[in-house]
Image (cartoon, helix red, strand yellow):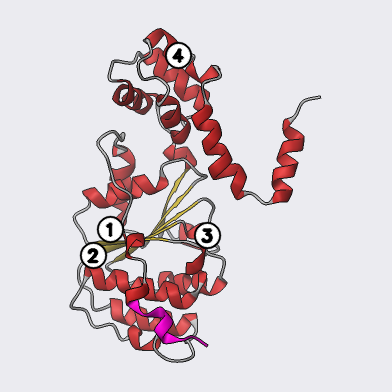
Amino acid sequence: MHDSESFNTSLLLKTKLYPPPVTSDLVPRTALLERLENNRHQRPLTLISAPAGFGKSILASMWLQESDCPHGWLSLDEGDSDLHMLAAYLLALIKGMFPTISLKTETLLEVPTLPTASILARSLLNDLDQVKTPFILVLDDIHVIHEQTVFDLLTELLNHPPINMHLVLIARHDPPLPIASLRAYQRVTEVRHGDLRFTSLETSQLLQKRSGGDISDAIAVAWTEQTEGWVMALQLGALSIRHRPQTAVSSILNNEDTRYLHEYLLAEVLSQLSPTKQACLLKISLQD
């Protein structure tokens, strides 16, 4: 049972509908962007799945900035696990892209008892069939969603996707969707941490942008190897190289000046784990 007043569209948080900004100091991911754009026309789903700090959201934001089609973005949080709330946000995104569209699904959100995910999906698919312009719909941080009904809705949408809709899901781990079947039928583009790792060339570009000077190939290779191309480690490490001679840059990741990376790991990785997992990691991390 839902109170329709509590889901009034005026109460939706509009700041969740904006993608992260793409700034001039970011390294362009040209090859990945070309792959995403080429596959958009052939596959209904893109899954960008990798641990924290691999530049997932920024990659998607770069793509939207370069793409010539309408797009909608939703940054999810745990409150969006409610099927009614998520459906309200989806309708707001569609209305934002196509203001004149008439959405019959809106009436389903006004009834006292919310219909099932299957009925909602069927209605939404019929609404989206009106759209004749290709568009991209991005759901960021889908891993925070815990209600299976939300994934039931997405599964139904992907079973019979509108010809002009391309769905993008960004997550730290794979959502409970039929990814294996979608992969088998070439209906999903997958971007994972191996794809998102920086090459030595991209590392060189990043360090040059942050240091304001030329970086030797040897230093770029060393940094890439030491971080295994992990984007966040490179970015945080790069904060420490300003105003340093290049001779000191090659070893910056080995000295004690890595506090930015330590703080990030504590805030974005360790603190996200359960107390049991934190205790386990603490025990196994200490040498005799």
**Measured from the top left, where is residue 64 in percent x and y?**
27, 52
Kind of element beneath mark 1: loop
195 and 82: which is toward the camera: 82
- Closer to the eye: label 3 or 2: 3
Magenta highlight on residue 137: no
Name the residue carrying label 4.
Answer: 250
Q: Is residue 47 above or below residue 160?
A: above
Name the residue carrying label 3.
Answer: 144
Residue at the spot x=39%, y=88% of the render?
110
- Closer to the eye: label 3 or 1: 3
Q: Amino acid at mark 1?
A: His
Name the residue carrying label 2.
Answer: 134
Kind of element beneath mark 4: loop
Mark before the other along the chain sequence, 3 or 2: 2
**Measured from the top left, where is residue 281 in percent x and y?**
71, 39
Gap in angstroms between the C-alphas marked 4 and 2? 46 Å
Highlighted magenta segment, given as a residue range: 1-9
Q: Are marks 1 and 2 in contact (CB under 8 Å)?
A: yes
**162 relative position to 192: left or right:** left
Gap in angstroms between the C-alphas marked 1 and 4? 43 Å
Magenta highlight on residue 2: yes
Q: Is residue 152 above or below residue 103?
A: above
- Closer to the eye: label 1 or 4: 4
Name the residue carrying label 1.
Answer: 41
Residue furthest to the top: 247
Residue furthest to the bottom: 112
